[in-house]
Amino acid sequence: MSRFLQLHLLTFYPPSNVNRDDAGNPKTATVGGVTRLRISSQALKRAWRTSDIFSSALAGHEGKRTQRLGEEILKHLLQKGVDEKKATSIAREIAGVYGKVKAEKDQNPTRTEQLVFISPSEHAAAIAMADRLAAGEKVDVKKEQESLLHRSDSAADIALFGRMLAGAPAFNREAAVQVAHAITTHRVTVEDDYYTAIDDLKQDEEDAGAGFLGEAGFGSGVFYLYLCVNRDLLKKNLGDKSETSVAEAALGALVEAAMTVSPSGKQNSYAALARAGYVLAEKGNAQPRTLAGAFARPIAGQDLMQQSIADLKNFRAELTRVYGEGAEDVCEMALGDEKSATLADIVAFCRA
């Protein structure tokens, strides 16, 4: 089996602001001495992980990133008639295994200070532990840590994107997928949208001014995105060999989401629901490599997509000439080329 799966995508976004900085403008990066638009890997992964594609393909195999596991335990115990003080104490003790719990006098005393990525099996184990404590069983929660925290299980999103537990590093999971920040292949100028809102109940005899005015940044361009999946690590994170079908489903969901799902920022204002215009999927055992170097010099011209595709192919060919083949098998999709693969073909290739 090929160890690495690499994806190279070129996606055109119309005027939009899907990923904002602290000032509300589109995120940018300086590459090749010019400004490019940027979409952070965090924004992309969040959009994919919470998409309908993931929830449909990975039902029952999705973790939850939350501070509120303790609240879930507390609610469960209260519904079973456990005294609130006792239930709160149990919830705090168990939640403390997953992260540092807030102070007892805090408004939310059962929440953890940090967000924790928890798998379905860990959630079930926490509830079961709470029931044992509520029933009066003497349990050393710290000694039974391994029943609450798992080094591997069937949580596909944790297997893909990893997690870090500062208080229990032995149960960290290294991400099986690496996701680069997407950048435009060309120079971009962030533009300002001056907009107004009108008060519908303002009378004609009043001033003609707007009820509100503001400014918002936006930009447009062709983005290059690179992903690399270590399929051996994905299977290790999922644990049992019987989870092969989960690994395949996770890869299929990841690829489909990367090709079709956009971050949600300002979508109601711009409707920038983009689809990849070009996808190159590669499988092999050679050391992975990004093709972002194709765009170190910004693309120019009227047909940015076609020029980006041409430069990516030329750069890949030069890497192959110098370093040898970077993949054993490839699958390619390009809008406008009836002989190229489809979404279904790319997904099947990546799952196989």
Image (cartoon, rainbow, N blue to C red):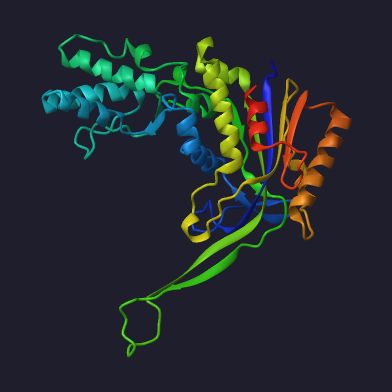
- Against 314, residue 75 (above or below) is above
Residue 263 in the image, given as x and y percentages of width and height: 52, 47
**Residue 182: image x %, image y %?**
63, 45
- Would you say residue 185 is visible in this rendering? yes
Q: Nearer the viewer, residue 89 or 277?
A: 277
Q: Residue at x 75, y 55 (%)?
A: 304
- Residue 248 located left or right of residue 74: right
The C terminus - image quarter: top right
Quadrant for the N terminus in the image: top right
Is 343 situated above or below 324? below
287 with respect to 75 (left or right): right
Identify the residue at the far bottom of this view: 205
Q: Residue at x 23, y 10 (%)?
A: 139
Q: Position of residue 69 (x, y in %)?
A: 30, 29
**In percent of the image, x 35 and y 76: which residue is there?**
199
Viewer-proximal residue among 267 and 338: 338
Whether residue 163 can be seen here = no
Residue at x-position 57% and y-position 32%: 254
The furthest residue to the front: 338
Residue 62 placement: quadrant: top left
Q: Position of residue 137 (x, y in %)?
A: 18, 9
